[in-house]
Image: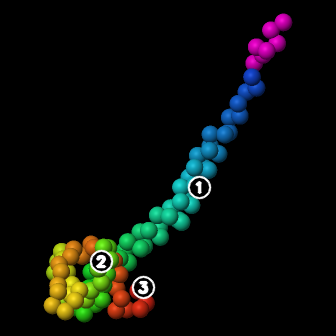
């Protein structure tokens, strides 16, 4: 009479461990292809900023091209035109054009 109230089949017991292994595998793949290259790029950019010296050609994150005139602890003085110098944070420098291997 009440055939639709029959018990549902029992769930598999081993599915939880497989799910955790799959999630861990996804995390490892994401780290290997996304996080690791980004950290490497950040380290290279920091090394570039730490190795700045007078005469280096740089570009800021705002797109201003110039030549380094003076390097201090927190900022850099850049000559953007004849007798036109601006002071920018080291964190605003993104590229070195004096060394073609760094482009």
Q: First in sequence, mark 3 or 2: give its number.
A: 2
Q: Is residue 16 above or below residue 103?
A: above
Q: Is residue 90 above or below residue 29?
A: below
Q: CA distance from mark 1 to mark 2?
A: 39 Å
Q: Is residue 41 left or right of residue 51?
A: right
Q: Position of residue 76 (x, y in %)?
A: 20, 81
**Where on the picture, by quarter, is residue 40?**
bottom left
Q: Position of residue 100 (x, y in %)?
A: 41, 92
What crowding class fits label 3: few (fewer than 14 Cα within 10 Å), some (14-19), or many (20 or more)?
Answer: few
**What residue did someone put label 2 on?**
60
Viewport quadrant of the N terminus: top right
In the rendered image, is residue 72 in sight? yes
Write down the region rendered in magenta.
Answer: 1-7
What crowding class fits label 2: few (fewer than 14 Cα within 10 Å), some (14-19), or many (20 or more)?
Answer: some
Element on which disc 1 rests: helix
**What residue did someone put label 1 on?**
25
> Is 55 included in the stretch rendered in magenta?
no
Residue at point 76%, 14% (across, down): 5
Q: Is residue 1 left or right of residue 37?
A: right
Residue at point 19%, 92% (across, down): 82
The answer to whether the residue labelled 3 contacts the one labelled 2, judged by CB atoms less than 8 Å apart, is: no
**What residue did someone put label 3 on?**
103
Q: Is residue 58 left or right of residue 77?
A: right
Please state which of residues 65 and 20 is positioned toward the viewer in this rendering.
65
Q: Residue furthest top?
A: 1
Q: Position of residue 73 (x, y in %)?
A: 17, 77
Viewport quadrant of the C terminus: bottom left
């Amino acid at each position: 009479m009440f055939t639709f109230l029959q018990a549902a089949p029992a769930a598999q017991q081993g599915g939880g461990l497989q799910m955790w292994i799959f999630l861990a595998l996804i995390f490892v793949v994401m780290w290997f292809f996304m996080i690791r290259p980004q950290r490497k790029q950040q380290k290279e950019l920091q090394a570039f900023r730490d190795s700045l010296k007078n005469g280096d050609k740089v570009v800021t994150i705002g797109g201003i091209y110039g030549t380094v005139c003076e390097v201090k602890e927190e900022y850099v003085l850049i000559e953007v035109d004849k007798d036109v110098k601006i002071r920018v944070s080291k964190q605003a420098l993104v590229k070195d054009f004096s060394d073609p291997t760094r482009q």
